[in-house]
Amino acid sequence: MRTFIPLLAVLLAGCSLVPDYQRPDLPTATAWPEAAAVAGTAGKPAADLGWSSFFRDPVTQDLIALSLASNRDLRVAALTAQAAEASYRSTRSSLFPTLNATAGFERSRTPGDVSGSPTPQNLRQYSAGLGVASWELDFFGRLRAQAQQAHETWLQQKELARSEQITVVASIASGYSAWLADSEAHAIADETVAVQEKYLQLTRDKLAHGSGTALDVAQAETTLRSAEASRAQYARQVAQDMDSLVLLVGAPVPDTLSQRMVAAAARRALPPVPDVPAGLPADLLERRPDILAAEHVLEGANANIGAARAAFFPQVTLTASGGTAGEGLSRLFGAGQGAWLFEPSVSVPIFDAGRNQANLDLAKIEKRIEIATYEKTIQSAFRDVADALAARDTYRDQLAAQQALVAAETRYRDLADLRFRAGTDNFLNVLVSQNSLLQARLNLVSLQLAAQQNAVSLYKALGGGWQEHDSGA
């Protein structure tokens, strides 16, 4: 009998009621839309391209590095993953017996009229031993299923921490680009104010010499005040962009880095980012952390079904102890002083008013919910990549057209200026040309920012941004 129960535990250790897990079929097309996948078809996958290799601008790299060290959302995500790991280790420990060492001393005095002795009885008792308290023999895999679910939760939180890092890296890059773009827009507005101040003075001089009109002066002043309002608007946006960057970074931007940012803004160009290959939609299943996290949740729900099934079967619990006891320390470990206890118990569910069946039904429904959630996560990822791919080439075409428009508006403004100064045309054409050129230049900055942020979005959508360096580097 002493060897039968351990042997039975070994024989049944492989018994599990967890259903075999099968990954759901890909709920999207097997290739990207043809019009969207014409570029970036070769090279290292985005998920294997470290952020420091994708964002090659030194200022961007320093901002990202600072955020990875200080961002509070990243800290919370990392600590949440650590907490999930600790919870998993705690749950897994229930698979093993808890062995306790015990030692005790007891002293008592019993009056003679109670003990039936002519004198009071003074007793001393010493004890020492080892014990196993309420160890459940996991014959039907309930505890293993619970440990598996906890393990999947830990893996999910690890993937969510990676996903949070990708989000922070992309947000820093996009936020810095927005700050540069708004700085450029502010500079354009400032230049426009300077030009409009000269035009206002010019129209006043023409009016004073009798070659101009009060209407020209009023139009010039109106344009100047509008440009001043735009300059104030972009000054506000630049300050708010910096506030957003400081929040993302999680710490004040050092003065040296701030000075480099100002110098970069003075160069009036957004830092370039490389194209990345799109690969195939199926690649997202192995590379996007949010998809991997959703799959771990699904696998955890699958394990919960096994735990719910095991509740229908008996639970075998073992309590055992062994040691020695005696009236004195000198006799504690002597011959014949041994004591032991072996107390197995079996609990068999007979009537629970349908609770176990309801829990099993709930586990199955929750798995179906997680399947739908997993598939929706994949579909959303597919859309993110397809949208970014579709935008990539159209932004190139739109940027080329907008640059040509700026050049044409510049020529228009120059000609209108010459005709006004020569006295062959009124100031209205100058006013219209100035407003058109200002809007065209601002639109070009907005398009450049949108194209830059689309490239960052594609890198993020493909699962890039969680590694500092290339894998294998």
Image (spheres, rainbow, N blue to C red):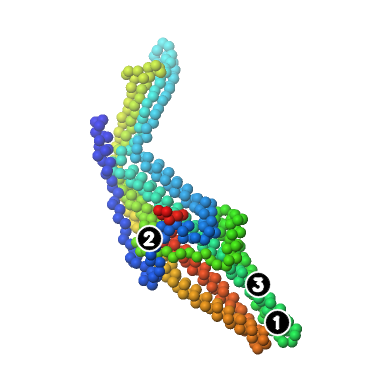
Q: Is residue 363 left or right of residue 57?
A: left
The quadrant in which residue 200 appears is: bottom right
Q: Which mark is residue 284?
A: 2
**x then y, percent, for residue 267:** 58, 66
User: Going 34% across and 49% down the picture, which residue do you hit?
Assistant: 304
Q: Amino acid at mark 2?
A: Leu
Q: Is 133 drawn above or below residue 467 in the view shown?
A: above
Q: Amino acid at mark 1?
A: Thr
Q: Amino acid at mark 3?
A: Glu
The quadrant in which residue 413 appears is: bottom right
**x then y, percent, for residue 352:** 32, 45
Q: Which secondary structure, mark 2?
A: helix
Q: Which residue has dot 1 on it?
A: 203
Q: Is 236 drawn above or below residue 70 in the view shown?
A: below
User: Going 52% across and 68% down the picture, which residue do you hit?
Assistant: 449
| Earlier-in-chain disc, 3 versus 1 | 1
Badge 3 density bin: few <14, some 14–19, many ≥20, Cα 10 Å: some
Q: Which residue has dot 3 on it?
A: 228
Q: Is residue 413 left or right of residue 202?
A: left
Q: Residue furthest front?
A: 473
**x then y, percent, for residue 372:** 36, 60
Of 217 and 344, which appears nearest the observer? Answer: 217
